[in-house]
Image (cartoon, rainbow, N blue to C red):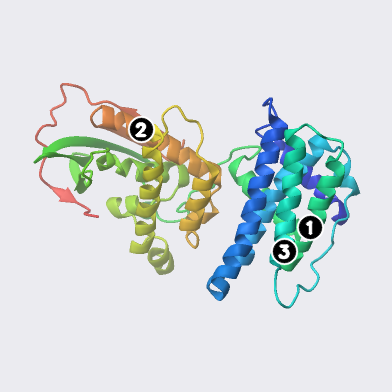
Amino acid sequence: MTDDRWLCGFATLAEKTDNFKDKPDHVALLAAGLIGEAGSVVSELKKKRRERAAYPVYREKMIEEVGDFLWYFVRLAAVVAPGLLEELEIPDKVVLPAADGPQLTGHLDFGAAVGEVLAAVSVSKNDDMRKLLGRVWALLTVISNDADICLRDAAGRNTAKTGSRWPDEKRYAPLFDDAFPVEEQLPRRLQVDFLERARGPNRAVILRCNNINFGDRLTDNIEDPDGYRYHDIFHFAYAVHLGWSPVVRALMRTKRKSNSKVDEAQDGARAGIIEEAVSAVVFSRAKRLKFFDDLDHVDLDLLKTIKEFVEGFEVEAVPLWQWETAILDGYRVFRSLCAGPGGRVMLDLGTRQLTYAPHAASDDQQRPPSTSRGAR
């Protein structure tokens, strides 16, 4: 792909991740996505003008939003105006932006032009699409230049994101602690019993491994019980599918002490707090979705939010599809634990498998030893 034909190459890659193309309202969905992303682009300028110097992430946000807009643009153009992408004038670099910054009028003109495309789609008037999309492209090049953004870079950012979410081949990233001594590795195989017991008017969950209780006895800590007492399963799911869990490392005493930098930055209290925060944010969304029952995916916005949470930690290198797998598999077992109640969970980091088995009715687990190790 030559430098001036990168747009056509991006369009080819975008087609591979178009999950709308088999739907009867394909064009309408692409148009809806186009106007939605255009709104996000205009909104970023609004935030910049409102917050001024207090909004330092403007350019980074614009790169992502413009990249997302480009995805819908090239897909719609390929469907309703074949050959247009080859004809568009593509800027090869960013010229010096205006000294007074991006202009609101340019963004409003851009939004209005996208609105005209949407109106034409709504009445199936494809004759004017080449002209309308051409005007959208011309205005996009202006506002991206004002934001000091190279369109090719924005397209590359989008390709990396979609590849992280929908790769051609799903291959797990290596475990982060492979090079460390075995005593500093997350257990490659582990069997954990989740035992539910009465705790006054509430229910508490105890973790038990090798006939030893460990961790804290957890309740739901909320007026309306919702099963969060079983949330440690999410940390175990992260360990299996991400190769990462500062919380499990603390529970199992496998911090990487041989490397003080890793021990401090990746296995310390802050990393554990971040992990707990991610679990809480996902749980809040999951409650509104029947804990992902009958769902085979996690929405992209939630995955993007998680990536922002973990920025600066080793797990930020893990692709989005692994996060999705960890969440869905963790909630699969979570639902079983709530229904059990409790049960036995087997972790296998070698095969990346998380397995649930109910406790046998005859199991003598009513009086577990009081010993508790590895408090959080």
Q: Nearer the viewer, residue 281 or 101?
A: 101
Q: Amino acid at mark 2?
A: Val
Q: The residue tagged with tag 3: helix, strand or loop?
A: helix
Residue named by callout 1: 139
> Alpha-carbon neighbours of circle 3 within 10 Å: few (<14), some, or many (≥20)?
few
In the rendered image, the residue lying farthest to the right is 87
Is residue 87 visible to the viewer in this orientation of the structure? Answer: yes
Q: In the drawing, what numbered circle is on residue 281?
A: none
Q: Earlier in the sequence, mark 2 or mark 3?
A: 3
> Alpha-carbon neighbours of circle 1 within 10 Å: few (<14), some, or many (≥20)?
many
Q: CA distance from mark 2 to mark 3?
A: 52 Å
> Alpha-carbon neighbours of circle 2 within 10 Å: few (<14), some, or many (≥20)?
many
Q: Position of residue 163 (x, y in %)?
A: 64, 44
Q: Position of residue 245 (x, y in %)?
A: 39, 51
Q: Amino acid at mark 3?
A: Thr
Q: Which tag is nearer the camera, tag 2 or tag 3? A: 3
Q: Position of residue 11 (x, y in %)?
A: 78, 43
Q: Earlier in the sequence, mark 1 or mark 2?
A: 1
Residue named by callout 2: 333
Residue named by callout 3: 105
Q: CA distance from mark 1 to mark 3?
A: 11 Å
